[in-house]
Image (tube, rainbow, N blue to C red):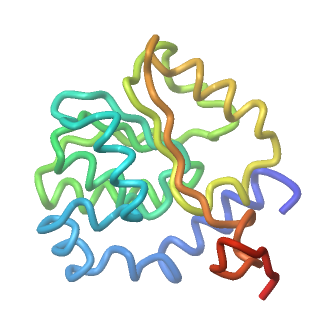
Amino acid sequence: MDNKADVKNLWNDWSDTTWSKYRTDEEISRIIKHPESAFHHTTHTIIKNIFPNLEGKRICVPSSGDNRAVFAFSLMGAKVTSCDISERQLENAAEIAKKNGWDIEFICDDTMELSNIQSDEYDFVYTSNGVHVWINDLHSMYQNIHRILKNNGAYIMHEIHPFTRPFGDNTERITVV
């Protein structure tokens, strides 16, 4: 993908097709019953170590994608802002939030800019699996994540690709699979 419009159009198209599997009643019920299931277990442990209680914490999830983490954070008591470049991803997530009575803010914005987000607003910023593959300016992304964080705020990411996808699970010897 060479430009932002291409990425945005692709995600808007995928939102109603490929990514709809993350919005089934069964998937949403699983997150409602076990919000931690939206995270890799190691990531959830890191989150709990930094924020043992998310009640009232302001969390921003740029490139929110399927919004599973957004829903989970809301269920854990956080005040959550979901940002994504795809209007359809946000619209679909907003329908689920409304249906379940969740107070989540949805903002259409580019993660490399976050121009619709005020500085020093968030206790915690989280990006999930698959964000980095779409970002063509990591410096801008991280500069803006830093900008929107409060002093002493935390940023946590969970990422498996493009960094680790080609490698096996052996932790003593790196192999391409």
Q: Position of residue 41 (x, y in %)?
A: 36, 63
Q: State the residue lying farthest toward the front.
A: 172
Q: Where is residue 64 in the image (x, y as percent from the top left)?
A: 48, 52
Q: In which quarter of the image is residue 176?
A: bottom right
Q: In this view, does 170 lie to the left or right of 173?
A: left
**Residue at 49%, 17% in the rendered image:** 118
168 or 172, which is in the foreground?
172
Rendered view: 144 above or below 73: above
**Residue at 46%, 11% in the rendered image:** 151
Q: In which quarter of the image is residue 147?
A: top right
Q: State the residue lying farthest toward the bottom.
A: 177
158 or 27, which is in the foreground?
158
Q: Position of residue 99 (x, y in %)?
A: 15, 61
Number of labels in the image equals 0
Which image quadrant: the C terminus?
bottom right
**Residue at 47%, 13% in the rendered image:** 120
Q: In this view, does 84 lie to the left or right of 164?
A: left
36 or 86, which is in the foreground?
36
Q: In this view, does 175 lie to the left or right of 151?
A: right
Which image quadrant: the N terminus?
bottom right
Q: Where is residue 166 in the image (x, y as percent from the top left)?
A: 77, 78
142 or 168, which is in the foreground?
168
